[in-house]
Image (cartoon, helix red, strand yellow):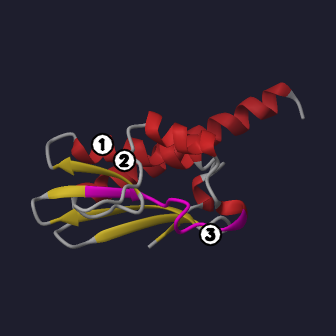
Amino acid sequence: MSQRRTKRREAATSASWTDFERELVVTLATMREDESLVLSLPDSGRYVQIMAIEDSGLLAEVSSNAFLAGKGRLEAIEELALAGLGWSPPTSGPDGSTPNFVRRYSRGSTTSATVGRLVVRTLTDVFRASDPSKVRIR
């Protein structure tokens, strides 16, 4: 494949992710308490879930190996990449547990944009989703 065609395809994919992120930000900004959004990659079982919580914030989770099997399991380098993006790792203890990677946000003027960017980076950089059409949304 020519370099020119490869660059055009990369530009189209980048534009697709930009549109995807823009639409995601709008969706996140309009979520009401107790609504949730799950973005998953069906072939791997990996997902990012965002929930509007009662204190007018957002709770975001990424699937951990506690819920993944086979080729869908996260490699150590992917878990490090999640931590590098700011996801808190799964925990367990006397105060409760969080079986997934998690981030909590208070609602503010830029919260939806921040969470939208994090979700897209997780899908592209860690889960290696090549195109938004590979993401199932429910």
The residue beneath circle 1 is: 113
Q: CA distance from mark 2 to mark 1?
A: 5 Å
Between residue 89 and residue 2, name the one nearer to us: 89
Q: Is residue 129 above or below residue 1?
A: below
Residue located at (47% from left, 46% from top): 120
Between residue 114 and residue 45, name the one nearer to us: 45
Screen quadrant of the N terminus: top right
Tag 2–tag 1 contact (CB < 8 Å): yes
Q: Which residue ends up furthest to the top in the rendered image? A: 3
Foreground: disc 1 or disc 3: 3
Residue located at (41% from left, 55% from top): 90
The residue beneath circle 2 is: 116
Q: Which of the two discs, 2 and 3, labels the residue nearer the N terminus?
A: 3
The residue beneath circle 3 is: 42
Name which residue type carries label 3: Pro
Q: Is residue 123 above or below residue 85?
A: below
Name which residue type carries label 2: Gly
Q: Quadrant of residue 68?
A: bottom right
**Of helix, strand and loop, which one carries label 3?**
loop
